[in-house]
Image: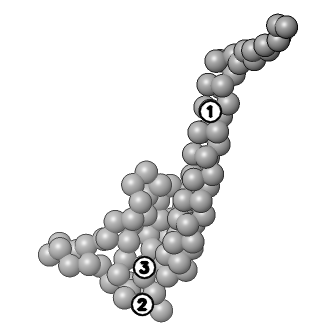
Amino acid sequence: MLKNKVKHKIDLGIVVGVILMLIVFSMLIAACVLMVKDEGKNKSIKNQLERVQGGYRQSVLYDRDTKVMYLWDYRGGYTVMVDADGDPLLYKGE
């Protein structure tokens, strides 16, 4: 008596597509986790710094504890402002 053997054909394109979707999904989750961690660090920095002047693209800020002044630029981040001798500029307000 002959038994009918059923062979399942799995499309290789579907398997590769599912694997790629899982990889992309896991990368998105990892990126979200990193952004949440970075947001927590940025909040502590933002609470430490006070804006003196500036707008959307650039701002002058100072550290509340040390009074050291920083230039913030949306393209490059934070930079310590220095005087002609290379010493950090200190905020004299308040």
N-term-proximal mark, 1 vs 2: 1
Q: Secondary structure at mark 1?
A: helix
Q: Secondary structure at mark 3?
A: strand
Q: Residues within 10 Å of mark 1 (few under 14, many from 20)?
A: few
- Residue 66 in the image, given as x and y percentages of width and height: 37, 88
Residue at screen point 51% across, 72% down: 41
Q: Amino acid at mark 1?
A: Ile
* Relative to 65, 15 lies left or right: right
Relative to 14, is 19 above or below?
below
Residue at screen point 79% across, 14% down: 6
* Relative to 21, 57 lies left or right: left
In three-dimensional space, the C-alpha distance between marks 1 and 3, rounded to whole angstroms, equals: 49 Å
In three-dimensional space, the C-alpha distance between marks 3 and 2, rounded to whole angstroms, equals: 9 Å
Relative to 39, is 22 above or below?
above
**Residue 62: mark:** 3
Q: Which numbered disc, 1 or 3, marks the residue closer to the eye?
A: 1
Corner quadrant of residue 22: top right
Corner quadrant of residue 70: bottom left
Residue at screen point 59% across, 39% down: 23
Residue 84 appears anywhere in the view: yes
* Relative to 71, 88 lies left or right: left
Callout count: 3
Tell me which colouring the rendered structure shows: one colour
Relative to 11, is 77 above or below?
below
Q: Residues within 10 Å of mark 3 (few under 14, many from 20)?
A: many
Q: Amino acid at mark 3?
A: Tyr
Q: Which residue is mark 2?
A: 65
In three-dimensional space, the C-alpha distance between marks 1 and 2, rounded to whole angstroms, equals: 51 Å
Q: Which numbered disc, 1 or 2, marks the residue closer to the eye?
A: 1
N-term-proximal mark, 1 vs 3: 1
Q: Which residue is mark 1?
A: 19
